[in-house]
Amino acid sequence: MIANIFVGQVIAMTMAQSAGPQVRKLDPLEAVFRDTTPVDRKVDSIDVAAGEVAEWQVVVRVTTGATVTARASTLKRVQGDGDLRGVKCRFIGYAAVLKPPTWVSSTQLRKIPNDFPAPLLVDQSISVGAGQSQALWVDVAIPKETPAGLYSG
């Protein structure tokens, strides 16, 4: 069975700032640095099998400093009964890499030293500096007994 999840309405974010932020959905494999300018990758829905986990990123870029708070809603089945309650949102933190590795990859993302996106944080709010981006990791566990269909929330 496949559960299609509509990505656009899953995340509610509030930002305490005057200018509107850029909010974009991204593939979970895309690295988001603080200076990343988000580009919408048209991740409008995700097809996932029952018993698996759907994952994606949301990136927020603010023009002025802001505190960003994220929370996930329950996903409701668009046609018929059923919902998905296992939606988790976690901010992606940054780890300082100060020393280059003993090997240098031909696809090196950034020069060292630099901060690289790495840990998933348990914080529900995070401060984002002016002109910076912040990524948020979203995952939804799909129970094996989940009826096939489109879920939105």
Image: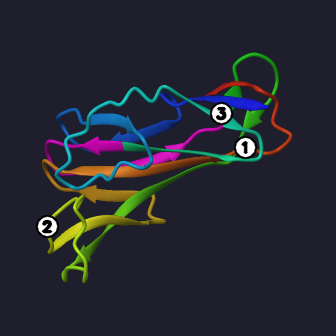
Q: From the image, which quarter does the N terminus lie in? A: top right
Residue 68 in magenta stretch? yes
Residues in magenta?
A: 59-74
Relative depth, front residue between 91 and 113 = 113
Marks 2, 1: nearer the viewer: 2
Find disc 3 in the rendering and name its residue. Answer: 75
Q: Could you tell me if the residues under marks 3 and 1 are in contact, i.e. CB atoms within 8 Å?
A: no
Residue at 24% from the left image edge and 36% from the top image edge: 21
- Horizontal and vertical percent position of residue 120: 45, 64
Residue 8: image x %, image y %? Answer: 48, 28
Q: Earlier in the sequence, mark 3 or mark 1?
A: 3
Quadrant of the frame with the C terminus: top right
Kind of element beneath mark 1: loop
Label 1, on which residue?
142
- For badge 1, the amino acid type reads Ile
> Residue drawn at (24%, 58%), measured in percent from left and top?
107
For label 3, the SS is strand
Query: Which tag is nearer the camera, tag 3 or tag 1?
Result: 1
In the displayed structure image, the side of residue 107 where residue 13 appears, left or right: right
* Number of residues whose C-alpha sits closer than 10 Å to that of mark 3, classed few (under 14), some (14–19) or many (20 or more): many
Q: Which mark is residue 111?
A: 2
Of the residues shown, which amino acid type is indicated by label 3?
Leu
- Residue at position x 73%, y 31% from top? 2
